[in-house]
Image (spheres, rainbow, N blue to C red):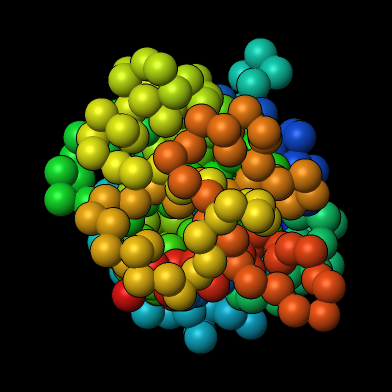
Amino acid sequence: MAIVHVESADDERLLPYRGLTDRQLRSRLEPDAGVLVAESEKVVRVALNSGLSPLSMLLEERQLESQAELIEALGKLDTGADVAMRAGHLEVSDASQAPSVYVLPHDEITKLVGYNVTRGVLCAMRRPRERSAAEVLAALPDARRIAVLEGVTDATNVGAAMRSAAALNVDAMLLTPTCCDPLVRRAVRVSMGTVFQVPWGRFKAWPNSDNSADGLGLLRARGFACAALALRDDSYALGEAELRNIEKLAMVFGTEGEGLADETISACDLTIKIPMAHNVDSLNVAAATAVTFWDLCN
């Protein structure tokens, strides 16, 4: 393994870490290049234990000693590759080599990534192929509780929902076409790496309730009752015994502001509400998923 001391944030070898706060840039560059960036020792270890392949790691000089064990573990993995900008696009080569560990002064790391890194190491990794919802369901024939996020674009909320799903026995998380990428750095960090543990996939069409190839139709074809989480007068309330007795349940959550689309609610088999007090009309989607999973998935 090569430990490379770099003096400037402008070094081309550090391209995977550049401008990590620019969501539009990263959402375009990372998937196209097949790269994701994990932040903090714990998240990196979860990713490695989940089988992801590291490309390189970035840290400060003072962290070389505290991260010696992690550096040693990376040195045993012959899975790195060159990452470079070619013809205006970030690309990962197919060449196999030990991942490099880049050491950069703290101020230069802040300049490079666009924020003050407080959680230690950053690790660029090969991005796993995104699976379709159909692929995920086919691989989980015994799944009983599925979560669906409709149009949730905030990376923090997606990461938090993933963490709740992992902790509270959700078998898989499925995303509609407009949902945020769960593998952007912020979602990965907020999830504490559980995005690498919870099976997830993306629908190609939504709600698509009349077609068993995708969307709500696919869920029904797999035996799931589809429940919209919405505040409706005709809703079941969390805590009602009938809900826990549903053998296979897909819980559908809407956007941070508007909630689920009316079309989606109408197309679902039932509606579930979280009872509210003090005239509060709704919970943030991350909180709503945690409350619902606790009640229906344990």
Percent position of residue 95, x then y: 35, 31
Quadrant of the drawing holding the N terminus: bottom left
Residue 44 at least partly seen: no
Count of marks overlaid on the render: 0
The residue depicted at 77 percent of the width and 44 percent of the height is 258
Name the one closer to the observer, 247 or 76. Answer: 247
- Quadrant containing the C terminus is bottom left
Judge from the rendering whether residue 26 lies leftward or rightward of residue 271; answer left or right. Answer: right
Height in image: 230 above or below 267? below
Q: Is residue 69 visible?
A: yes
Within the image, what quadrant is residue 88 found in? top right
**Closer to the camera, 258 or 91?**
258
Q: Against 234, is 221 above or below?
A: above
- Where is residue 22? Give x, y as percent: 79, 43
* Image position, residue 283 (x, y; %): 71, 66
Residue at the image point whose x is 51% and y is 85% from the top: 66
User: Which residue is more in the foreground, 200 or 144?
Assistant: 144
Residue at 34 percent across and 64 percent down: it is 242
Closer to the camera in the image, 201 or 236: 236
Residue at the left extreme of this rendering: 142
What residue is drawn where x is 53% and y is 66%?
Answer: 237
Q: Is residue 112 above or below residue 261?
A: below
The outermost residue toward the front is: 234
Residue 212 in the figure: left or right of residue 151: left
The answer to which image quadrant residue 261 occupies is top right
Q: Where is residue 45 in the image (x, y as percent from the top left)?
A: 39, 69
